[in-house]
Image (spheres, rainbow, N blue to C red):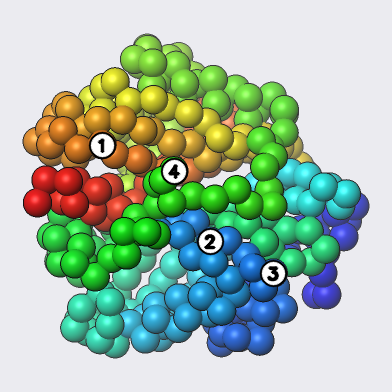
Amino acid sequence: MDGFDPEAHDFPDFLLEATSDIWEGRGLTTRVQAHYHPEVILRGAEGIQFGARAMAEDAMATLVSLPDRRLLGEDVIWSGHARVGMLGSQRILTQATHTGDGALGPATGRALLYREIVDSYAKRDQISDVWRVTDTGAVLRQLGQTAEGWARTRLPDLDPDSQPFTPRVDVTGPYTGLGNTDQWGEGFAALLMRVMDGDLSVIPDQYDRACHLFYPGGVEAHGVEAADRFWLGLRAAMPSARFEVHHRIGMEEPLMPARAALRWSLKGRHEGWGAFGRPSGADLYVMGISHAEFGPRGLRREWTLYDEAAVWTQIVAQTG
């Protein structure tokens, strides 16, 4: 496909093809340059990078460790139009085998299965702004490592001017939109804001009793109790932190359930027991992305990711 036609709803295919071209088609320089603006900004929970060349180098480094990496595009939830550009929140299931020495350590030969969610803004057939959250916790668990141990090992090699990603290292990029005002995105945002305000009674009220859930660390669970456990653990770890929804998309389209995508953050002090263990007092910034599908009995599927390794990097950096 050459470019995308918003009126024909080609944009999701444009993002899926770009992912396939770069990773499986090995278009590590030519296809990156074709799909990405030369000055593209990539914000990952692990840090911020600038330029298509940096993106190509990042891809090469990953493929050294995971040469057979396959990226299966599960969904793209999108908004926008040709005049202002379009943002797609792409959920990807990655399959790979750790057969190369590299950033993940000596090759183990272990098979990996994990998700990442990537928000990409494109205009005139080029992606220029990206926000990416990878379930690094799931990767590390499958390799027999912990996020805390990984952070301690990696900390001496990190560049404090760009790693990990926090508002301190962020810059304003070409996309400053907030998404759309569709009822499903607005409703999902309102639900999570109530949860993070401590009103967990909204979970059994608005989640389907049989909801299917996917959370950081490769966790797959069912039922409202699992949703309560996850969101309570996150909020309890940072009880006074500020929760903010930065971007929201809701959409309905043929052959699909109503869906929503949110990009959010939690910023504040780690002063409680919960998702990150013993309170450390560290100032943390958690970047998260959530996808949801809705049915006749409420929220029926949810995918929420944040990068545990990036959080632990901040804890270790401040506590030794």
Q: Nearer the viewer, residue 141 or 64?
A: 64
Q: Residue at x 35, y 40 (%)?
A: 285
Label 2: how many residues lie within 10 Å, few (<14), some (14-19) or many (20+)? many
Label 1: how many residues lie within 10 Å, few (<14), some (14-19) or many (20+)? some
For numbered disc 1, what is the local secondary structure? strand
Q: Earlier in the sequence, mark 4 or mark 2?
A: 2
Does any portion of residue 258 appear in the rendered image?
A: no
Amino acid type indicated by mark 4: Pro
| Residue mark closest to the camera, 2 vs 1 | 1
Q: Which mark is residue 1?
A: none
Q: Which residue is mark 3?
A: 37
Q: Earlier in the sequence, mark 1 or mark 4?
A: 4
In space, the residues marked 1 and 4 are separated at their CA atoms by 12 Å
Q: Which mark is residue 42?
A: 2
Residue 313: image x %, image y %? Answer: 23, 53
Residue 174: image x %, image y %? Answer: 69, 52
Q: Which mark is residue 167?
A: 4
Quadrant of the rendered structure where residue 108 is? Answer: bottom left
**Image marks 1 and 3: residues in contact by CB distance under 8 Å:** no
**Image marks 1 and 4: residues in contact by CB distance under 8 Å:** no
| Residue mark closest to the camera, 4 vs 2 | 4
Does any portion of residue 275 appear in the rendered image?
A: yes
Q: Which residue is mark 1?
A: 283
In space, the residues marked 2 and 3 are separated at their CA atoms by 11 Å
Residue 161: image x %, image y %? Answer: 37, 59
Amino acid type indicated by mark 1: Asp
Q: Earlier in the sequence, mark 2 or mark 1?
A: 2
Q: Is residue 240 left or right of 265 when viewed as pictured? A: left
Amino acid type indicated by mark 3: His
Q: Earlier in the sequence, mark 4 or mark 3?
A: 3
